[in-house]
Image: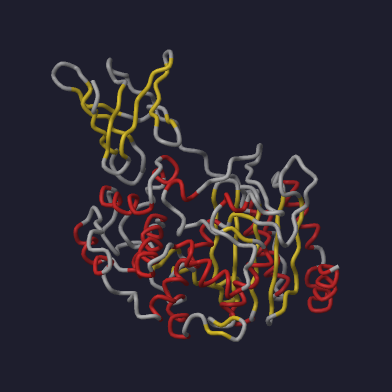
Amino acid sequence: MRFFWLFLLAARLCGADLAGFDAVAEQGLREWKVPGVAVGVIQDGKIVFAKGYGLRERDSNLPVTPRTLFAMGSVSKSFTSAVAATLVDEGKLQWDAPVRSYLPWFRMYDPVATELITMRDLLTHRSGLPGHNFIRFSTYLSREELVRRIAYLEPSHTFRDVYQYNNLMYVTAGYLEGILAGSTWEELVHDRLFVPLGMSRSNTSTLDTQKSDDFARPHNASKELPFYVYQKFGVGPNGAVNSCVEDMLKYLQFYLDNGEAGGRRLISKRQMAELWKPVTVANPKATYALGWQVGTYRGNFRISHGGAITGFRAFMALFPDKRTGIVAMINSEESLAEALADTLADRILGLPPEEHLAALRRPKPAPPASQAVPHIPAGVEGKYTHPAYGEIEVVREGDEYGVKFDALSIGLEGASFLLNEKGQVLELHLPLEQAVKPFVFVKVTP
């Protein structure tokens, strides 16, 4: 009954603006084999649209609703920057103080970055590091240990030279927040954002999501996927928030209300302004602030961020001048969330409609050509070590060789070897990050 009245309200406020949107959403689900999607719009402090389409999991009859939990991926970065803003307000953190003034042991590969990098640098993707994302999926670490191992990840650019999206810098930021508050990033997000904003369904662990009465499961175009458990890999501040349309609309309204919720100021106006202050040029159409992209959409000022993690995508957008927030989330890996959010923006803002789904039909870039398997020297089997990745093992099964990390195995395509004068393997060189030279793993067993 609650949502019946919600849709009557939507009809009164939006009139014909949303006419035909149901058909667009359902078309997107069909054409892109996406099980389900949830979307919502808040305008002038009122929910004007909140609806689910499709299924929480492909082989079920469980419908998506505005209460259905989805993994939000990098939408979480704005939660991490918001927590940082609360710590700045409390005098526990300065945006432009070196990280080492709070974590004296912190190191990066580049000694200049080690001394100078600040919280603002961590949150704006100008550390000099490329993604180095393989470690987030391969190696089980505590958060502190992961932050310590950043010292052994090579940069591809000079510190503060260019924008390079890096999740590990957000892990560092969240870890530092926990240290400064005597807590953890997860607890800070819960206590400082979820609770005061009334985001009662949201959490920061997919293990908690699966205990809920209404949650979506992750998929790609062909099958259901396992949930990615951030905390097993030491990560989380980069992307671990799980939420639903109902809760995310409260979150967006918090920003439209400039840091207030329920008559209470959670973040000062001064620090709210810092969150949206552009720092790094992200692309020709947008700059990156503290956990947000700042740009325009069809001539309208827009603050936004997307998110993607195994089996999920999400997108949120704020149009502060229009007092409007939009969110979309799907349980698949296509770009449908962004397309549907833009479709809603067109209708809500009164813009001439565009065919956003058509943009998804553009041919996707061809995957990189597979690298040849090198000649495998005798005695390659055994354990190897690298200071960032720790211990790995090369194993042989029949005629096939594989490299076993904690959470996955890969082949030896693109690998190379260093041998001694007797032909014995001393080192295994693995290309785990395209932007830097291969990682050198030293053999520790004969």
In the rendered image, the quadrant that contains the C terminus is top left
x and y, in percent, of residue 270 in the image: 43, 85
Q: Residue furthest top?
A: 398
User: Would residue 273 be seen by someone viewing this image from the given angle?
Assistant: yes
Side of 351 where 388 appears, left or right: left
Q: Quadrant of residue 182?
A: bottom left
Q: How is the protein colored in the picture?
A: secondary structure
Task: Kindly identify the residue that appears in the image at 69 percent across and 67 percent down.
Answer: 246
Left/right placement of residue 340 relative to residue 19 reads left
Q: Position of residue 383 (x, y in %)?
A: 30, 27
> Measuring 81% from the left and 67% from the top, which residue is drawn there?
3
Q: Position of residue 34 (x, y in %)?
A: 69, 47
Outermost residue toward the left? 421
Q: Nearer the viewer, residue 197 or 326?
A: 197
Quarter that holds the N terminus? bottom right
Return the residue nearer the eye: 95 or 294: 95
Q: Quadrant of residue 23?
A: bottom right
Compared to 192, does 383 lie above or below? Answer: above
